[in-house]
Image: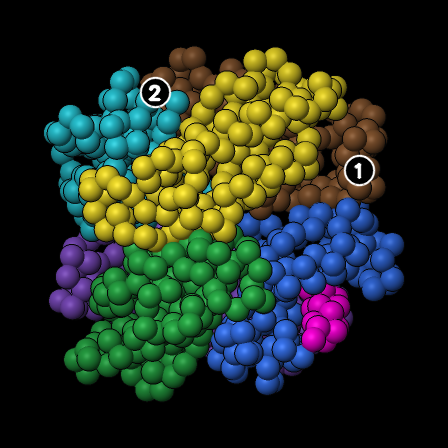
Chain colours: A blue, B purple, C brown, D green, E yellow, F cyan
C-alpha cells in the first residue's frame, strides 16, 4: 500500500450552539493545520500515488472556500455545528470530488482512500477518512 | 471513519532488568509525549467523536498515576518491564476504562478503537491500539 | 545568560479594519501557539530562572483573558488592530506585570527580559520582547 | 496491536525523466525525513515489538546506501524514477530483508507489517506499507 | 522590540569541493526549510513589523532563484561553496534588497534586522543575520 | 553574524531536593532534546561557522557523560540541583572546552558564542548562553 500526503492551513472563526462545548459556545477561531493523506494499492503510470503539486493545488482550491471566513455562516455547518470532525469531513468530501475531475492518468489507481486530519491546536486534532 | 486526538506528556524514571537493553539497564528516565487517537465510524449527537476537553481531562487523570514517578516501583510493570510498548498498553487500557464511565451521550458511538502513542525521543516511539 | 521557556495556546476570532490586510479584513480566527522566553543573567536561589510551573500558571491566567473570545471587542485592540504583533505585546506586558507580583525569591534575578512569540500558522509568527 | 517507530534522514540529489513533474525534471535534491513504523499483534519475549536500538542500526545501514548520493545513478530507480513513493518502497523492502536476518528472539512476532514514510518537505510526504 | 517571521522551503542539489566535508563532496541534495525573522524597534502604521503576506511573497520570489536547481552551477557559490551558511547569507542579502523596493509604509520602521535560518535536516541548521 | 546549530537528545533520571519543586522532588526523569547554536561574526576558511559533523560528534561525546544515568549521582549537580538550566550550563561549558581542542582551522573564528537549549517537554525548555 502506497500513500502520498500534503499539508496546508486555514484560519477561520466559528462558535458552537451546543451547550456541551462550554466556553467554545462563544465566538472564537482556529488555525486548522490540514493534513491530507491518500492511500492506494499501486502507483499510477508516473510512479506516484498522485502528483504532489496537483494535490496541493486542489487542496488549496477547496480550502479557499473556508479560509478567512466565519463558519457560522457556511451552509455546510447548519446550526453552528462546525466541529473539527465536521470540517474534516467537509474538506475530504470536497477534495474527493475535486480529484475525480482529474484526467485518468493523474488520479490514484485502484481502490484508493483519503484521510483529512485537522490540527486545531498543539494538543488536539480530528480526522475523517473515506474511500475515493 | 472519524477520529479525534489529544496530546499530553509525562516525565518518568525507570530501568530495565533485561540485559538486551544495554545501557538502558541503568536507572534513567524519559519524557513521554503521549498522543491518543480515538476512531469511530460515526459522530455522537454533539457532532464529535467525543469532546476534546473531556478526553484531555480523562487522559490527564490516567497520566497523574505515572507522572513524576519511577516506573520500577509501579505494579503494572513487574520485574522492571516498563518498555514504551508496555506503558502505551497500560495508558490505553486505563483510558478505555475511564471513557466507559462517561454518560452514554458523551462516549464514542459504534465500534470505536483507541490508539495510544508514546514518543520517548525525537527519533523513537511505541504505540498500542485496541477496541474500546 | 540563562533562559527559561514555556508554551501554551489560545483560540480567538478577529478581523482587521485596515484594508492593507485584504481577505483578513473579514471575520476569521486563529490558534495562536504562545511561546514565552525569559532571559536572566543569573539563576535565582532555586537554581532556575524562575519555576516553570509558576510561569505556566501565570501565562495561563493571562491567556484566559483572550481565550475563546473575539479580539474585535477587546479594549486592548481598539479599531480592530489585533495584529499578531499587538497581541504578543499585550501578552508580554500582562505577563511582566503578573511576574512582578511573585515573591522576590520566585522572580528572575538581575536585569531580565521577556520575549513572547505567537505562531499564527505553520508558516508565520510575530513576537515582542521587552525588559522585565 | 503494538507498534514501534524510529526516525532518521538522508540527503540525496535526483531528477525526473517524466515531463509530468515540471521543474522537478531538473537536477535538484531533498532531505528525506525517514520514519519507520513496525506493527505486530504481540510483543516479543523482551516486552517490545523489537529493540529500538537494533531497528535504528538496521535503518541506518539501509540508508547508508542512499545518503549523499544522486539517485539518478541508483539501479533501483531506472530511467530517473526515484519518486518519493519509490524510495519509500525501496527502503521498506531493504529493511524488511535486514530485519529477517536478526535472531528469532529479536524479531517482531506474529504477522507484522512495516510502514516507511518519507517527508520530503514540511508540506509533503509519501509512504509504503507491506507485510514483513 | 518586535519581530515577524515566515517560513518556506527549497529543494536543491549540490556538492562541495572542500575535502573537509567527506561524503558531502559527492553530489547530493537538501530540502532547506527556510525561516525568516525581521526585527524592528517599532511597528509601522499598519500595526505590524511588515505584512506577513508581502514578506511571504518576496521570500518566494527570492527562493524561486534557487528552487529545483543545482547550486554547483549558481554564480553566488563559486567553486562549489554552497554551504548552508553561504546559502542563508545569499537569501538574506537578496531578501533585504527585495524589502527595500517596497513602498515606505510597507517596510519595517527604524533600525531593523533580518535573520534567515536554513534547516537542512531534523538535526542541523545554519543562519545569517544582518541589518536591513 | 552567522550561526550553525545541531540537535541530539539524552534520557536521564533525577529528583530535586528543593521543596519549591513540589512533585518533582520525587525521582522522575526526562528526555532532554538538546539544541546547540554557535554564533560567529565570520565564516572559517571552509565557508562554515564550524563543520556540522564535527559539532555533532563533540556534542555526542559530551552527552555520553549524561545519557542513561541518574543526575542525582553526578558531581556537577551536588545536592540534587540538576535543574534544566544547570544541565544546559554544564553541557555548554563542556562543549566549549571540547571545541577548543579542535585544530585552529576547524574552530569558529572571531568572537563566537554558544547557546545550549534543553527541551524537557513539549511545553518547557531552559537554555544557557556564553562566549566561547
Q: Quick check: A124 above or below B81?
A: above
The percent position of residue C81, horizontal first and vertical second, equals 77, 27
Report the disc number at residue F41: 2
The image quadrant that residue A87 belongs to is: bottom right
Q: Residue at x 77, y 34 (%)?
A: C21
Q: Is residue D117 magenta?
A: no
Q: Quick check: E99 above or below D102?
A: above
Q: Which residue is mark 1?
A: C22
The percent position of residue F100, horizontal first and vertical second, equals 16, 26
Label the magenta part by its dominant secondary structure. helix
Quadrant position of the N terminus of chain C in the picture: top left
Magenta part of the protein: which range? Answer: A88-103
Q: Quick check: A63 above or below C132?
A: below
| Dot 1: chain letter | C
Q: Tell me the SS state at disc 1.
A: helix
| Dot 2: chain letter | F
Q: Is residue A92 magenta?
A: yes
The image quadrant that residue A6 belongs to is: bottom right
Residue D21 visible in this rendered orientation of the protein: yes
Residue C100 visible in this rendered orientation of the protein: no
Gap in Å between the C-alphas at discs 1 and 2?
40 Å
Relative to the observer, which residue lies in front, E97 or A72?
A: E97
Q: Tell me the SS state at disc 2.
A: loop
Amino acid at each position: 500500500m502506497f500513500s502520498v500526503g500534503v499539508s496546508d492551513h486555514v484560519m477561520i472563526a466559528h462558535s458552537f450552539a451546543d451547550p456541551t462545548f462550554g466556553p467554545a459556545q462563544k465566538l472564537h477561531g482556529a488555525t486548522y493545520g490540514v493534513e491530507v493523506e491518500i492511500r492506494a494499492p499501486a502507483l499510477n503510470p508516473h510512479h506516484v500515488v498522485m502528483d504532489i503539486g496537483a494535490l496541493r493545488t486542489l487542496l488549496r482550491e477547496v480550502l479557499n472556500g473556508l479560509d478567512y471566513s466565519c463558519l457560522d455562516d457556511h451552509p455546510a455547518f447548519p446550526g453552528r455545528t462546525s466541529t473539527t470532525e465536521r470540517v474534516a469531513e467537509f474538506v475530504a468530501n470536497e477534495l474527493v470530488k475535486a480529484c475525480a475531475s482529474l484526467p485518468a492518468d493523474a488520479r490514484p489507481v485502484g481502490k484508493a482512500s483519503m484521510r483529512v486530519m485537522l490540527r486545531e491546536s498543539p494538543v488536539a486534532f480530528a480526522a475523517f477518512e473515506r474511500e475515493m
